[in-house]
């Protein structure tokens, strides 16, 4: 066959991952904003001799690294989308970036808890005025970052349809949200300590914040690991695929695999048995577009059982 004849059955495997995602530009802005704030705090802390500013600058640095990983994942996925080394494109790089960010978020949560418990057991003097300035500055920067990233829940809440989760963007969003939460809790604790002298409130609130951030990280780890481990799609999705393929009453699905290959993208392998042989294209046309099935492989086997016997078995 000529190449032109074969082109009908051939297709690219980039699945739109070669296009710049909205989250990439927003993440870049937040990375730059966080990095500039980090540098300003480190310089100011060194010049003013403020350990609070230095500590928050280093804290900003850790989150800059996490956000840079998210940005790298976007760029890598886009630039390598057409590479033949990836069987189903680079959609899972998005989930991998989100998974890495979730791990860093969990480590950040553990560090928060450890430091808070340590300060609860061995209280240290707090420079309330300087610490409040740092906390307010951090809250301002993180509030702006949260607004920039602004994760919109653009996925369909009906589990029959493809979820368009951008796990990479969600990871970046949770990092700045965790920072914002830390700043809010710190301001509340510092005000209580400054005006009422209750110093132990500061580490106690730090522990509560660590627990909340830990829960966020666990949720994101669960979501991204499902994608990375090719977990079967929800039962409702699989049922919709089966109903669409079997709508003529002659075909029966005997083996089905449906899994995520990227944000809003799924692949499927469908094996079915039928008396009346139809082409795979015929069955593909029956699949709902809303399921986000971007790569579908169908194999059709002829049923050797007489139709009358099969109908009788179905009636029992």
Image (spheres, rainbow, N blue to C red):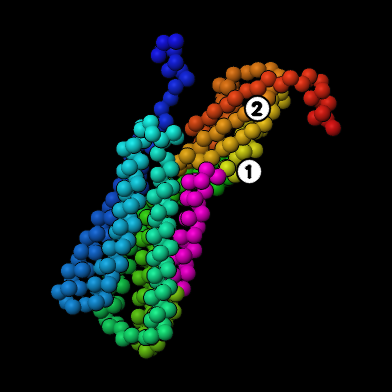
| Residue 309 place in picture, x, y as percent | 82, 23
Element at badge 2?
Answer: strand
Q: Nearer the viewer, residue 111 or 291?
A: 111
Check if residue 106 falls in the magenta segment. no
| Residue 205 place in picture, x, y as percent | 43, 76
Badge number at residue 235 = 1
Residue 252, compared with residue 63, is above or below; it is: above
| Residue 122 place in picture, x, y as percent | 38, 85
Asked whether the viewer can see residue 290, the reply is no
What whole-number distance in Å separates the C-alpha atoms at marks 1 and 2? 18 Å
| Residue 117 place in picture, x, y as percent | 43, 79
Span highlighted in magenta in the image: 208-231
The residue labelled by disc 2 is 272
For image coordinates 40% across by 77% down, the residue present is: 116
Q: Residue furthest top?
A: 1
Q: Quadrant of residue 55?
A: bottom left
Answer few, some or many: residues within 10 Å of disc 1's Cα (few below 14, many 20 plus, some between 14 and 19). Answer: few
For image coordinates 19% across by 66% down, the residue present is: 40
Element at badge 1?
Answer: helix
């Amino acid at each position: 066959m000529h190449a032109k004849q074969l082109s009908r059955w051939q297709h690219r495997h980039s699945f739109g991952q070669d296009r710049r995602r909205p989250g990439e530009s927003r993440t870049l802005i937040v990375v730059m904003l966080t990095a500039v704030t980090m540098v300003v705090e480190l310089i100011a802390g060194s010049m003013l001799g403020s350990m609070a500013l230095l500590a928050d600058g280093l804290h900003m640095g850790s989150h800059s690294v996490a956000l840079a990983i998210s940005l790298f994942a976007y760029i890598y996925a886009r630039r390598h989308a057409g590479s033949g080394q990836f069987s189903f494109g680079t959609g899972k790089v998005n989930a991998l970036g989100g998974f890495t960010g979730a791990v860093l978020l969990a480590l950040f949560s553990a560090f928060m808890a450890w430091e808070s418990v340590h300060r609860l057991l061995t209280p240290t003097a707090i420079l309330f005025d300087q610490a409040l300035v740092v906390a307010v500055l951090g809250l301002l920067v993180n509030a702006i970052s949260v607004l920039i990233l602004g994760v919109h829940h653009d996925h369909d809440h009906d589990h029959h349809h493809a979820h368009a989760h951008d796990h990479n963007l969600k990871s970046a969003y949770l990092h700045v949200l965790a920072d914002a939460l830390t700043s809010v809790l710190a301001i509340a604790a510092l005000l209580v300590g400054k005006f009422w002298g209750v110093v132990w409130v500061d580490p106690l609130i730090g522990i509560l914040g660590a627990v909340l951030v830990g829960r966020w990280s666990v949720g994101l780890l669960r979501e991204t690991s499902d994608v990375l481990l090719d977990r079967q799609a929800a039962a409702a999705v699989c049922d919709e695929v089966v109903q669409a393929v079997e709508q003529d009453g002659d075909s029966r699905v005997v083996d089905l695999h449906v899994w995520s290959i990227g944000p809003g993208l799924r692949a499927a392998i469908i094996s079915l048995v039928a008396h009346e042989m139809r082409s795979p294209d015929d069955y593909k046309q029956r699949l709902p577009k809303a399921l986000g099935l971007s790569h579908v492989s169908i194999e059709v086997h002829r049923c050797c059982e007489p139709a009358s016997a099969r109908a009788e078995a179905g009636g029992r």
